Image: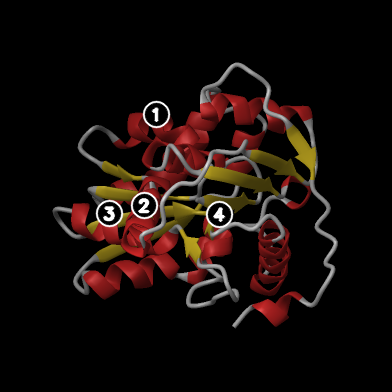
Amino acid sequence: MHIGVFDSGVGGLTVLKALKAHLPRATFTYLGDTARLPYGTKSPDTIMRYVDQNVAFLQKFGVQAIVVACNSASSVVVNRHWSGTPVFGVIEPGAQVAARASRSGRIGVVGTRATIGSASYQKGILALRPEAAITAVPCPLLVPLVEEGWEEEALTLEVIARYVAPLRAAQCDTVVLGCTHYPVLKQGFAAVLGPEVTLVDPGESVATALEHHFVQAGIEPVESVPDRWFCTDLHPSYLALGQKILGISNHLPWQAADLTPTLDPTSTRR
């Protein structure tokens, strides 16, 4: 099986890492749109245009499924489909896990402005637990801090503490890390929120969902071929962060990606 994965940067590698754990024999093609990150500050129309281009790029490699490893992008692709390719976002699986995990129904969501503004997690959780009290907080500074490799800096912990103050005040017992960069900061969130708060990583959730999809579809792994790694901006700091996220010491064979559209992307979307 061949799976395409894309994110606005290298934070989506947290999702890819989970996918590899669940589907170790699969082949992956990863695209990090590092030249245009972050997506979370862009309008829905702009994000949708980026998504169309990313999907068209990955389809050229014959992928059998695409994972949108970006919450901001996932928030605009709900109920959309690209012909011939099933597309999986991270929001619905994450919302399902959060709704089940919360003991009190007080659930927090942290994410980019685009993700929080779309209310996608809020709607997904409330569809399963109508009585839930949800506190959603946009955290626009966290993605740049992760991309700079500052996840262990004291400043980053202070920023996290400022952002989650409303969640602590609301006594949330479950918090959704609603951006694929945020699992890199999981220790920081845990330190600020305390051990009694369950942190939900939607990347793990979508990996489980995709594994189930392939089992149900009867799709078996084929002869293994090397994974492909693409970025739209091959900046050394992004590449180093990618190695850190995946927990590897060897350099990945990153290639430059040209997302110049060769066709009208809306022709494959419905």
Q: Is residue 212 above or below residue 117?
A: above
Look at discs 1 and 3 and give the one toward the viewer: 1
Of residues 195 and 120, the one nearer the viewer is 120
Q: Quick check: 97 left or right of 261?
A: left
Q: Rounded to the nearest whole Å, what is the CA distance between mark 1 and mark 3?
A: 21 Å
Mark 4 residue crowding within 10 angstroms, few (<14) / some (14–19) / many (20+): many
**Amino acid found under the numbered disc labelled 3:** Ala
**Marks 2 and 3, Cα distance to the nearest angstrom?**
35 Å
Dot label at residue 187: 1
The span from disc 2 to disc 1 (Cα, nearest Å) is 27 Å
Tell me where residue 32 appears, x and y as whole percent. 68, 46
Q: Which residue is mark 2?
A: 211
Q: Is residue 126 above or below residue 41?
A: below
Which of pointers 3 and 4 lies earlier in the amino acid sequence?
4
Q: CA distance from mark 4 to mark 2?
A: 19 Å
Tag 1: Cα neighbours inside 10 Å, few (<14), some, or many (≥20)? some
Callout 1: helix, strand or loop?
helix
| Label 3: few (<14), some (14–19) or many (≥20) C-alpha neighbours in 10 Å | some
Dot in front, 1 or 4 = 4
Residue 94 spot, x, y in % from top left? 36, 56
Q: In this image, 236 relative to 185: left or right?
A: right
**Residue 117 x, y percent position in the rendering:** 52, 68
Tag 1 or tag 2, which sits nearer the N-term?
A: 1
Q: Residue at x 62, y 46 (%)?
A: 29
Q: Sequence order check: which comes first, mark 2 or mark 3? A: 3
What residue would you read off at disc 4?
Answer: 70
Amino acid type, label 1: Gln
